[in-house]
Image (cartoon, helix red, strand yellow):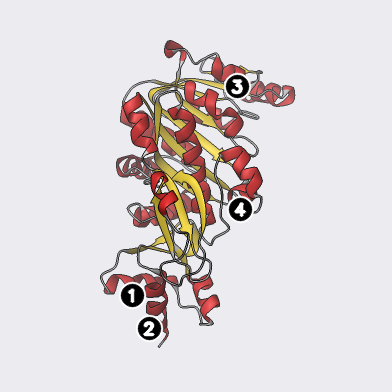
Amino acid sequence: DFAVLALQAYQRLVNRQIVVCEPLAGCGVRGIRFAREVDGVSHVIVNDINEKAFQLAKYNVAMNHLDEKVEVHNEDANFLLSSHAAPRRRFDAVDVDPFGSPAPFLDSAIRAVRDGGLLALTATDMAPLCGVHPKACLRKYGGKPLRTEYCHEIAVRLLIGLAVTMAARHEVAVSPVFSHSTDHYVRVYLRIKHGAKEADKSLKEMGYILHCFRCFHRETVRVDALLGHDGLCPECGGKMDYAGPLWLGSLWDCSFYELMTMEVNRKKLGRKRRIQKILTLISEEIRGTVGYYVVDRICEKAGLPVPSVKKVVDALKAEGFKASRTHFNPKGVRTGIPAKTFLQLVKEILQ
């Protein structure tokens, strides 16, 4: 559903007919939905290297009477994408949704998207991205993860960070317009912009998250500032660990988000209520800081009972702080205040 909404938002933005590619399509359901449900889609290429999936996709396309609009391929995904790397053969949108990491397909996917196009990426290998298997994360994503309470946000930022660095090699910039963490996967939607200067701008948004496991303090530093950091927590003096390099910029574009919310009411979606709930939560955190606090974890460490997230958010706002819930975690509170201030406010709520 999010894929349909995002593609429609992109089509409204560019206001022209678009060509879409799904290089790892399985039985082709998503590509068929693009062709049937997204206005302005002129052509869709769905592909899968598996022969059974290819045959099933062909059958599904025929059953939906979309033979002229949806083209089914049985090729290696990287081969297909690379064959569309020439400027006049590029796609308006490419949706890479593998089992596991999109990293093996990312370079060819970036080259196959036209200037101003949309690249959607899914990662389902949450164990490496969330720090359970850090070596695997370093191999696949070129960055160090961290097992913190906000590890799902770190996962999204690592994925975007990989796309930024890989695109920059081709003098291409990527910038996220929408991101979400749902169930057991993360997904990002990236606008592609060609040009060395644009790529340099994207690279400036890269950096590291420093985290103290003793007192929950966290801070962000840009790539060039990490070497000058002593690695000690400024709040408690404990040793800090880090995640990165990763994307430190915004995870959402406000204009793109607004277009998506407009489409929710127009489209017939199977899980509309759930989609609306997630979009509402994102609207609250769209301009928030990097990372969030999980109330349960803070209270558990301090030996305190757990107040409701709503009470904490309301109390923070009453004190003049920016605060919101987050779609990443139902117990999460996104705010930029220091951890010790957050804990003190929780104690005041419980009095």
Q: CA distance from mark 3 to mark 4?
A: 28 Å
The residue sitting at 50% across, 58% down in the picture is 150
Relative to 208, say whether 299 is above or below.
Answer: below
The numbered mark at residue 315 is: 1
In the image, 25 versus 210, the foreground residue is: 210
In the image, 333 versus 136, the foreground residue is: 136
Q: CA distance from mark 1 to mark 2?
A: 9 Å
Residue corresponding to mark 4: 131
Residue corresponding to mark 3: 78
Looking at marks 4 and 1 on the same chain, the residue that comes earlier in the sequence is marked by 4
Q: Assess disc 1: are there few (<14), some (14-19) or many (≥20) residues with their C-alpha within 10 Å of its C-alpha.
A: some
Looking at marks 3 and 4 on the same chain, the residue that comes earlier in the sequence is marked by 3
Residue corresponding to mark 2: 348
Q: Mark 4 touching mark 1, by CB under 8 A?
A: no
Q: CA distance from mark 2 to mark 4?
A: 33 Å
Element on which disc 3 rests? helix
Q: Quadrant of the C terminus?
A: bottom left
Q: Amino acid at mark 1?
A: Ala
Image quadrant of residue 51? Answer: top right
